Image (cartoon, grey):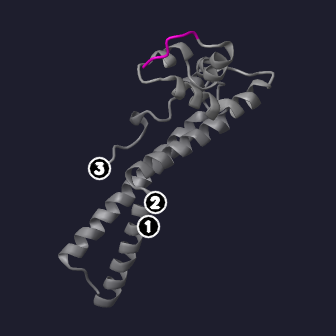
Amino acid sequence: MAIDRDLTDFERAVLAHVVVDPTAWVSRPEVSESALAGKIAHHLAAFAAAVLAPDYQTRAERENAPQPVPSGSQLKEIIKKEAGRWILAQYPDWKQRNMTARMTELLKIRALAESWTAEEQAEVSALEAVWDWVKSVRSASDLLEAGVDGMTEEERSAFAAADPAHWPAPF
């Protein structure tokens, strides 16, 4: 049941700290008086601390504020982080550890038996293909980072490191 009253100035201020449009938030049918009171109580301390800052902004103001243009070194770090995110999205840490362990086992087998079975060779080939893909992501990152120094401020501002066009397609 939507709240059928006007928000107090205090309620509106606390909500504006955490939602873009307080009026729209309380107008949702599932928001009750108890949900409003709970949200206010949950965010009150953070709001009280933040509102004292001379440059305080509501959530709507924060979301609509122009973002600073990253410096060249900042953009290089953004690119490196995106490369890492790209790799981890395809191969999370746990999967990378398992693949490393399996390759270690396969190398031990090769050292002892001097050859792999067809199935083991297929595993090695698959693991090598994954590693080749990881290296291609790293190479793409290196190329993007190398191009940053020649970018204008406008180009750095518009650059979207997360654009899939910058990265090798996962397989």
Question: Is label 3 or label 2 in front?
Answer: 2
Give the mark nearest the N terminus, 3 or 1. 1
Does residue 37 appear in the picture of this structure?
Answer: yes
In the image, 31 versus 100, the foreground residue is 31
Residue 163: mark in rendering: none
- Residue at 59% x, 34% y is 148
58 left or right, relative to 116: right
Circle 3 sits on which residue?
A: 171
Mark toward the start of the polypeptide (3 vs 2):
2
Q: Is residue 146 magenta?
A: no
Q: Which residues are magenta?
A: 1-6
Numbered label attached to residue 93 = 2
Q: What x and y, as percent, mark residue 91? A: 39, 55
Above or below, 96 relative to 169? below
Residue 97 numbered mark, or none:
1
The CA span between labels 2 and 1 is: 6 Å
Give the main secondary structure, helix, strand or loop, of the magenta stretch: loop
Q: Amino acid at mark 3?
A: Phe
Up the image or down, 37 lies above or below 121; here it is: above
Element under disc 2 = helix
Measure the alpha-carbon separation of dots 3 and 1. Answer: 19 Å
Q: Type of residue at label 2? A: Asp
| Amino acid type shown at disc 1 | Arg
Image quadrant containing the N terminus: top left
